[in-house]
Amino acid sequence: MRFEPFSREGLRSLMDKLMPTEVPKADGSKVARSGVAWVLAVIGLVLGFGIGSQMGTAESADPLMPHSIPVDDVASLPALPAVMAADKDAAADVRHLHIDNQQRAFAPVITVADSPPGQVLAKYASVSIDSLPIHHSTSETTTHESFTLVTRGEIGLGESLGSSLRRQGISPGTVHLIATEMRKVFDFRRSRPGDQYRLGQDSDGRVLDFRYSQGPEESFYLAWEGTRYTVRKETAELQPQIAKIAGVIDSSFYGAVLSLGEQSALASEFARILAWDIDFSRNVHQGDEFQILYERLYRRNDDGDEVYVRPGRVLAGRYDGRVGEHTVVYFEDERGIGAYFRPDGSSVERAFLAAPLEFSRISSRFTRARAHPILNVTRPHLGIDYAAPRGTPVWAVADGVVEYRARAGASGNLIRIRHAGGYTSHYAHLSKFAAKLSVGDRVEQKQLIGYVGSTGLSTGPHVCFRVKKDGNYVDPMRIASPAGAPVDVKKFVVFQNIRDQLLADLGPGPLNRADEAL
């Protein structure tokens, strides 16, 4: 059935017939009808024919053209018809889409004839119809009683979660609900570009679930449990696979690792393991070779596929260059505590690290006579200046106790640590100290203590690193640092078996390709 719009004269004629201006009384006389009642009747008739006309016209209109009714005009209706995708030759499936209080704007109704049955292609949101995006569901509807609309997104540069969701047509009320409930486990002020989210809503617009992922390992989850929302933090379960890379250095060790398709974290970890024997900022040369046997950690995504996350433990490694050949293997004791050893069972670790940071260059060495760059006088420089970008982490070179942590005149922000054997180490010109680090705290080797800066008498960001032995300054690069404990003699046979297997897997030389799983 199709309704054509009435002209003003036609409408008045119809109203005169249906509701005459004079109503006969029982005694035969007539009484005039109230003007207010007549006006209300007209409004009711107009609304009735208007809605019928729109629904009738939709049958012949462009199937991709949205037809909308302002929510305020239909608030008294029991429900607003919503047309879901249907077969081309079949009648459109129709169900009722109730208006959520959070989304009182416009509710589009879209008919798509060429789409799979039951796939929802439209949802309502607090945006204008012209700019309303069409969201595709990831799951097909099995009944007309409920379906889930899925919205996926990623935080863009300069965006917040709220602006990203609103850009996708999600209502402010829904955004507020998510932020309020998730506040218990995550502060969205910590959102970063690249963070991903997935929102599931039912046909009434209610949030069924929301997942926010900050990196591949950590997610925060919101779910409707029938009577209330629950939130939790989820950490992905990572599964290791053994792999190896091998290469030849062209310009830098880090660049060589990256060129083989691996992350810089693997280069940093390998450099840390060999830090007692090799200074990777100075002792790396073109043509040096390396092999690394390590774990690659994977997780399963929502589709069940394995996704590479990051490198795990280094199991064995070899570096062969001008600094000589250095081979290490990983070995755990019966308590599960692991360490790195040379093939003969001696520890690669020493009591003191070679440097307290990853630096770009040495700007000044230990000397008894140096021309001071600011004071223009010659005097001793009883330490080593390591130049590095402002904010570079600085760590303790050995286990010890913090003796001093404060401003110290020309040294700027200074930390002094007491170590065993009569040693103390000094770290000057820091931009700031590590959080919660206090005098009297025990620190471990390579524990963060502060950040590179240029406080005090300084020409640029660097760390002036000094070491005293029994109260006298010594050259940090000439410290005879004692080695760590070797493999326990009672465990040496077990160590040999593991060592032989790891070195066999490591191989004798470069493979010239990355990610060869064993």
Image: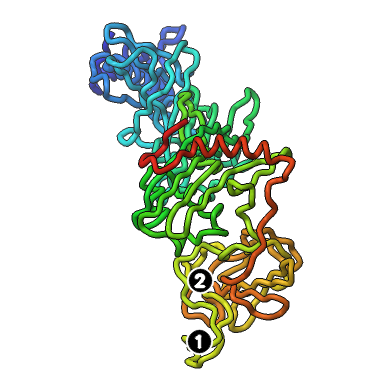
Q: Nearer the viewer, mark 1 or mark 2?
A: 1
Residue 7: x, y in percent? 23, 21
Q: In the image, is residue 83 above or below residue 231?
A: above
State the separation of the CA atoms marked 1 and 2: 16 Å
Is any atom of residue 215 visible in this view?
yes
Residue at x-position 60% and y-position 53%: 348
Residue 45: x, y in percent? 36, 18
Which disc number belongs to residue 63? Answer: none
Residue 384: x, y in percent? 54, 75
Is residue 187 left or right of 387 when viewed as pictured?
right
Q: Which residue is mark 2?
A: 386
Count of numbered tags = 2
Residue 475: x, y in percent? 59, 76
Task: Estimate how packed mark 1 is, as few (under 14), some (14 to 19) or many (20 or more) residues with alpha carbons within 10 Å.
Answer: some
Is any atom of residue 174 visible in this view?
no
Q: Nearer the viewer, residue 157 or 74?
A: 157
Q: Which quarter shows the N terminus?
A: top left
Residue 425 falls in image quadrant? bottom right
Q: Earlier in the sequence, mark 1 or mark 2?
A: 1
Q: In the image, is residue 324 above or below residue 494?
A: below
Residue at x-position 59% and y-position 72%: 478
Q: In the image, is residue 376 above or below residue 173?
A: below
Q: Which residue is mark 1?
A: 370
As shown in the figure, which amino acid type bears the numbered disc 1? Arg
As shown in the figure, which amino acid type bears the numbered disc 2? Tyr
